[in-house]
Amino acid sequence: MKKNSAYSTTNSQTQKLITKDSFTLISSPLQGFTEFRFRNAFHTYFGGIDTFYAPYIRFNNKPEISNKYQRDLELNNNHVPELIPQVMTNDADEFLIAVHYIRSLGYKELNWNLGCPYPMVTKKGMGSGLICDPGKIDHILERVHAETDVIVSMKMRMGYLEPTEILKTFPILEKYPIKNIAIHARIGKQLYKGGVDLESFQKCLDTSKHQLYYNGDITSVASFREMKALFSKINHWMIGRGLIADPFLPSMIRANTEVYPENRWEIFREFHDTLYKEYDEFLQGPTPIKMKMQGFWEYWSQTFPDPQKAFKAIKKASNPRAYQQAVNDNLKSVS
Ligand SMILES: Cc1cc2nc3c(=O)[nH]c(=O)nc-3n(C[C@H](O)[C@H](O)[C@H](O)COP(=O)(O)O)c2cc1C
């Protein structure tokens, strides 16, 4: 099988269309999902993503970075076109430690997470809980730009309580050469509930002088086309959960088609088996690997004809043999 793009055989007319209508597709980070094993396997079997953001680095009440991030970020472990590390902090000293860390690993850019919605994070004034504090954002950016030459990009929600919070940060952000601001068009309070707020996102586009990336609920080629028609100024699109649920999505968006490759489920099987093997080698014992794969199946099952049945079969599997049988049964239901 030809790997690296499910659509490596697109005809020349489609190719022309793609070149004329150029845009960048970015994999939005999902802690616990889009780690290096996933990113590498994804790029090998599906392709379509230009840039991957790594899940955030976080400090644990100590001014040092846990060893656990190293394996995920080491350039030798990452076989994707571009990877950008991310940090979540509300402290300038921590930010500076993260800058030195990612520089030592060979990165030039650090993405700053002002989007995380979970109360454990936001109550401490981090993630989307920091958007309402432009003074603190200013102080951190001031020190980072005075003391390092790192390229800073941001990933934000539009606020925690109100989607207007972000508008008050723009005059501060404009003082700095921020590379881009990726905006998940929700507020923190929503968590993942309710829809994306496209009117408020349009206000961001009308107000910010920075380059904005769009993020939120791109789950199909049709929804991508709708967003693209609405926001003609945007040429960077971030996909998070949609890409886990349907890993063909980015390459289909690229090929401007809603038609899956004929060997869709064969490719999916090989991808699944690669992920399983790699995680099985790394995780100790049957329970951790089962839980890891079950996490993925919560998303993958959405693309099966009976999502609940497909997920239930995986959940029920109490040992590795039963798990493999459940996978076989799920794939039999679509072939
Ligand atoms: C389980 C999970 C983990 C996430 N981890 C991160 C993270 O580490 N960094 C980050 O910026 N966003 C994180 N996000 C948010 C996503 O990157 C993305 O912004 C959000 O899901 C909206 O995009 P989507 O609708 O395309 O999924 C996470 C989301 C989920 C559901």
Image (cartoon, rainbow, N blue to C red):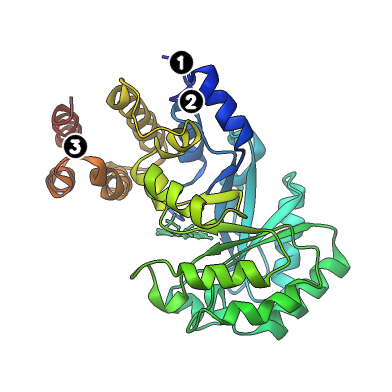
Q: Report how far apart the C-alphas of labels 2 and 1 lie in the structure.
A: 8 Å
Q: Amino acid at mark 1?
A: Lys
Vertical relation: 172 (above or below) 42: below
Residue plotted at (76% across, 66% down): 96
Work out which quarter of the rendered image holds the N terminus and state it: top left
Q: Quadrant of residue 66?
A: bottom right
Q: Report how far apart the C-alphas of labels 2 and 3 lie in the structure.
A: 28 Å
Q: Nearer the viewer, mark 2 or mark 3?
A: 2
Q: Position of residue 116 (x, y in %)?
A: 50, 69
Instruction: Of the two numbered discs 3 and 1 on the same chain, state the one appearing first in sequence.
Output: 1
Query: Is 105 on the left-hand or right-hand side of 10?
Result: right
Query: Is 231 on the left-hand or right-hand side of 107?
Result: left
Q: Are marks 2 and 1 in contact (CB under 8 Å)?
A: yes
Q: Which residue is mark 1?
A: 2
The circle drawn on residue 5 is 2
Q: Amino acid at mark 2?
A: Ser
Work out which quarter of the rendered image holds the C terminus and state it: top left
Residue plotted at (66% across, 82% down): 168
Residue plotted at (69% across, 75% down): 170
Secondary structure under badge 2? loop
Vertical relation: 222 (above or below) 65: above
Q: Position of residue 122 (x, y in %)?
A: 50, 79
Q: Which residue is mark 3?
A: 323
- Are there few (<14), some (14-19), or many (20+) residues within 10 Å of tag 1? few
Secondary structure under badge 1? loop
